[in-house]
Amino acid sequence: MDFNDQLRRYFGTDDPTTISPGALESGLEKMKVDLGMEKDPGRRFALWALMHMFGQAPDLDVAFKDEAEREAARNFLDLLDRSS
């Protein structure tokens, strides 16, 4: 999943600075629905990570039933923390 493609799909632009409040709300709602329906672990992770970047990701135990997937998400969060 390409980051810019996901931005265009959910928010209608690949420039996060131009997302209107309405488009943000609508796009995040679509992402929540897609996350709930997605079966592919990689796609679920990509959706969750993008939602996290917008401050709207569900808790790890809600988003990921598999412990290995939760651990991958924790590692992602640790990497983000270290890069700040």
Image (cartoon, rainbow, N blue to C red):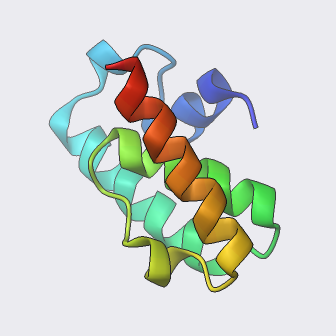
**Residue at x-position 65% and y-position 56%:** 72
Answer above or below: position of 74 versus 1.
Answer: below
Outermost residue on the right side: it is 40
Left or right relative to 27: residue 45: right
Residue 82 image offset from top left, x and y in percent: 40, 26
**Residue at x-position 45% and y-position 45%:** 77
Which quadrant of the figure has residue 2?
A: top right
Answer above or below: position of 47 versus 44.
Answer: above
Left or right relative to 57: residue 25: left
Which quadrant of the figure has residue 8?
A: top right
Q: In which quarter of the image is the N terminus?
A: top right
Residue 68 image offset from top left, x and y in percent: 72, 71
Left or right relative to 22: residue 52: right
**Residue at x-position 43% and y-position 32%:** 80
Residue 84 image offset from top left, x and y in percent: 31, 20
Instruction: Please name whichever residue, 72 or 32, is drawn nearer the observer in this view of the structure.
Output: 72
Instruction: Please name whichever residue, 82 or 73, is drawn nearer the observer in this view of the structure.
Output: 82
